[in-house]
Amino acid sequence: MDRYTKPAVLLHWLIALLIISAFGLGLTMVDIPGLTPTKLKYFSWHKWLGVTVLALVCVRLLWRLTHKAPAYPRNMPQWQQSAAHGLHLGLYVLMFAIPVSGYLYSLAAGVPVVYLGVVPLPVLIAPNPELKPLLKATHYWLNMTLLAAFALHVLAALKHQFIDRDNIFKRMLP
Amino acid sequence: MTLSRLLRPSLLALAAASFTLAAQAAPLKVDAAKSAVTATFKQLNVPVDAKFKKFTATIDFDAAKPAEGKASVEIDVASFDLGEPEYNKEVLKKEWFNAAQFPKATFVTSSIKPAGSGKFDVAGKLTIKGKSTDVSFPLTVKKEGSAQVFDGTLPIKRLTYNIGEGEWKDTGMVADEVTIKFHIVAQ
């Protein structure tokens, strides 16, 4: 069976790990009441993770566009192939939209992002109190959508592995 | 008791009042809507601007006679706006401004010296959270129509005034350097 290329596999798992960390950190930090140094630190780390994800997703998209993904097994129903394809497309869209929405939310709140505390990133929009709650809600709901898409993605992988036993999961294993 | 004796205290008060008026000349009228006092600080190297929304400035200044000029600014620390109501409440607490005990931050000039076209060197006393220090900073004054525009930047160290106590003393988290900027329009 065809496999994904090594860089594609590496990017998949690395980005997965970073997204899970950023997601967990995001939920943790907003639950800290008041204002504490830990809270501020988590906010910064969360933003650094998000920016890293965005950069890696750019690389991953370029790689994906120039390197064909392995074909689905021939016996996989057409609707399932379309669903898988659609879900992958959706995951790509979310992997771009979520860091971008978070980045803009931070700017709207008047807090620019300084990557790793060293590299000031472009201030694309001015502080904007009207846009701020809108971007906050957008960032949150995009993440909830990602959570649902992620659950489907994992369930599908498990189904292929344990019900269909078509070894499709192996194509993405290191 | 005669009438003159009855009147004497009020006459004295009147005389005193007119004397103060004469000595102060006419202080300028500050246009609060066009004026601003901001503080910029860095947290993990991220510059964040915050605004003092409420302050009063009393300025008596004639660019032709700067040495006779004086100014005082009184800032309501409770009006500090970080752009997030939850954080605004936090910074009023004891380890930051301790607004309950020290509701005002003040600046009073002690001298204003000319330093070239439209520029002046200002020295004075800055009091925040009950701590006073002598500070000096360059001031620029511009004419805009009939109004005078005063602009200045004053770098301070927050720990000098105990802004950020306890775990907030860590300057790796929030830098010690804070830049106070003001833009005051008055006529």
Image (spheres, rainbow, N blue to C red):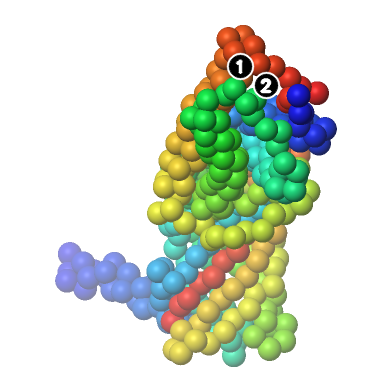
Task: Tell me the amino acid under the disc marked 1.
Answer: His
Q: Is residue B48 visible?
A: yes
Q: Which quadrant of the view contains residue A26?
A: top right
Q: Residue at x 51, y 53 (%)?
A: A108
- Which image quadrant: the C terminus of chain B? bottom left
Nearest the viewer among B173 and B160 is B173
Q: Which residue matches tag 2?
A: A168
Nearest the viewer among B89 and B102 is B89
Give residue A79's mark.
none
Q: Residue furthest front?
A: A74
Q: Residue furthest top?
A: A162
Q: Is residue A41 visible?
A: no
Task: Tell me the amino acid under the disc marked 2.
Answer: Ile
Q: Residue at x 75, y 48 (%)?
A: A66
- For disc 1, the chain is A
Residue A127 percent across, percent down from the top left: 51, 57
Residue B157 percent across, percent down from the top left: 71, 50
Q: Circle 1 — which element? A: helix
Q: Which quadrant of the view contains residue B4?
A: bottom left
Give residue A160's mark.
1
Nearest the viewer among B65 and A32 is A32
Q: Residues within 10 Å of mark 1 (few under 14, many from 20)?
A: some
Residue B136 percent across, percent down from the top left: 70, 66
Q: Earlier in the sequence, mark 1 or mark 2?
A: 1
Q: Are marks 1 and 2 in contact (CB under 8 Å)?
A: yes
Nearest the viewer among B93 and A160 is A160
